[in-house]
Image: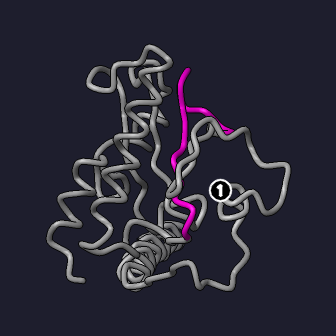
Amino acid sequence: MAFSDKLIKKKKTILVLCGFSMLLLLVLVYTWGSNSYATSTSLTPCKFCDFANRRQGPPPVLLVETDEYVIFKDIAPASKYHYLAIPKLHFESLNALNKSHYGLVKRMEEGMIEFLKTKNVDANNDTIIGFHIPPFISVSHLHLHGISPASEMSLLNKINFMESFWFKSAKSAREILEHREL
């Protein structure tokens, strides 16, 4: 084997090992982070908490506000209609919830569906409603995406918001919570 062939083989081996190391790190972060239960007592500043509770502005225009959650337009829409529903209490992600939060998730989903109806969007047709799962979250505050039409999303967004280990539909999220301990 020539010297250059050995060097190429060594570089490929290093790249493969780096790839496996990154994958292992991702799995560790995912599993370690899945047990974090950040709630409203979190001391870390959260822009979504500020938006939902009108503490610091200017917040986005709140299109829906209830005692539990608010809905507003996503700043980087994946399609024509892309909105977020966020609870007023701070929960880092779906992983911070348990069986007792089933009702909150259901009400957020129902609120999103009702809101989308005001935009003439049929939530049962060409619409995505769901949550990203850590470590694949952009903001460490639970947020439900409501996106339509899904068929007009870019390929990258279709992958980003497809039902998978990094994104769960609201229905799947509720099924997970049904079996989670208190």
Q: Position of residue 127 (x, y in %)?
A: 36, 27
Q: Is residue 93 left or right of residue 125?
A: right
Q: Secondary structure at mark 1?
A: helix
Q: Position of residue 102 (x, y in %)?
A: 27, 63
* Residue 104 highlighted magenta (yes or no): no
Q: Quadrant of the C terminus?
A: bottom left
* Residue 77 highlighted magenta (yes or no): yes
Q: Residue reaching furthest front?
A: 67
Q: How many marks?
A: 1
Please give the name of the residue rendered at 36% of the width and 44% of the height, measured from the top-left corner: 109
Please give the name of the residue rendered at 48% of the width and 20% of the height, measured from the top-left corner: 118
Above/below status of 32 relative to 80: below
Q: How is the image coloured?
A: one colour
Above/below status of 162 relative to 21: above
Please give the name of the residue rendered at 60% of the width and 33% of the height, measured from the top-left corner: 77
Q: For the residue carrying disc 1, how many other residues have a C-alpha within 10 Å: few (<14), some (14-19), or many (20+)? A: many
Q: Position of residue 18 (x, y in %)?
A: 48, 75
Relative to the observer, which residue lies in front, 88 or 17?
88
Relative to the observer, which residue lies in front, 65 or 57?
65
The amino acid type found where label 1 is placed reads: Ala
Q: Position of residue 125 (x, y in %)?
A: 28, 20
Quadrant in the picture for residue 52:
bottom right
Magenta-colored span: 75-89
Above/below status of 94 relative to 173: below
Quadrant in the picture for residue 40:
bottom right
Above/below status of 63 relative to 81: below
Please give the name of the residue rendered at 68% of the width and 60% of the height, measured from the top-left corner: 53
Relative to the observer, which residue lies in front, 31 or 73?
73
Quadrant in the picture for residue 29:
bottom left
Residue with the mark numbered 1: 52
